């Protein structure tokens, strides 16, 4: 079974915010490439893993259909909050944060 993965506007805004944060911290060209690679890693992990096995990841507090995907990157990583829609084979990514951030919006 394959699921369709969609990104909410909030999640896309989170990706922009995380990317911008990394770009602002860049001091060498390699850091600029790191920002792009981080964004690609987040998107690739979510699109691939959530399309195949969305029920495999840890439950979020809201309901059994809300879950979190931990995405390793370097020495830390990111966390994507997503919902498995009960009406069909759809997964919606609602938010993305860095693991060291306080919490979702």
Image: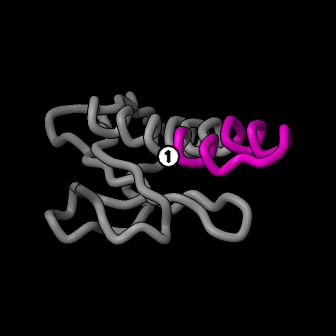
Q: Is residue 22 magenta?
A: yes
Front residue (pair 36, 51): 36
| Quarter of the view holding residue 65 | bottom left
Point out the image quarter for the C terminus: bottom left
Element on which disc 1 rests? helix
Q: Is residue 24 magenta?
A: yes
Q: Position of residue 88 (x, y in %)?
A: 22, 32
Front residue (pair 49, 87): 49
Asked whether residue 89 appears in the rendered view, the answer is no
**Residue at (48% x, 71% y) in the render:** 100
**Residue at (35% x, 29% y) in the render:** 6
Q: Position of residue 2 (x, y in %)?
A: 44, 33
Question: What's drawn in magenta, residue-wise?
Answer: 20-37
Q: Position of residue 49 (x, y in %)?
A: 53, 46
- Our reading of the magenta stretch's main secondary structure is helix
| Quarter of the view holding residue 79 | bottom left
Determine whether, in the image, residue 15 is placed left or right of residue 72.
left
Determine whether, in the image, residue 56 is placed left or right of residue 91.
right
**Residue at (47% x, 49% y) in the render:** 53
Q: Position of residue 58 (x, y in %)?
A: 38, 68
Above or below, 90 against 80 in this view is above
Count numbered badges in the picture. 1
Q: Which residue is denoted by mark 1 in the rendering?
A: 18
Determine whether, in the image, residue 64 is placed left or right of residue 97.
left
């Amino acid at each position: 079974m394959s699921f369709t993965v969609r990104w909410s506007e909030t999640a896309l805004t989170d990706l922009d915010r995380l990317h911008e944060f990394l770009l602002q911290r860049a001091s060498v060209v390699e850091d600029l490439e790191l920002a792009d690679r981080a964004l690609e890693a987040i998107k690739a992990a979510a699109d691939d893993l959530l399309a195949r096995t969305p029920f495999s990841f840890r439950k979020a507090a809201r309901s059994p259909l809300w879950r979190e995907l931990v995405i390793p990157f370097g020495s830390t990583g990111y966390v994507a909050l997503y919902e498995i829609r009960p009406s069909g084979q759809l997964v919606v990514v609602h938010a993305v944060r860095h693991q060291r951030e306080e919490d979702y919006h």
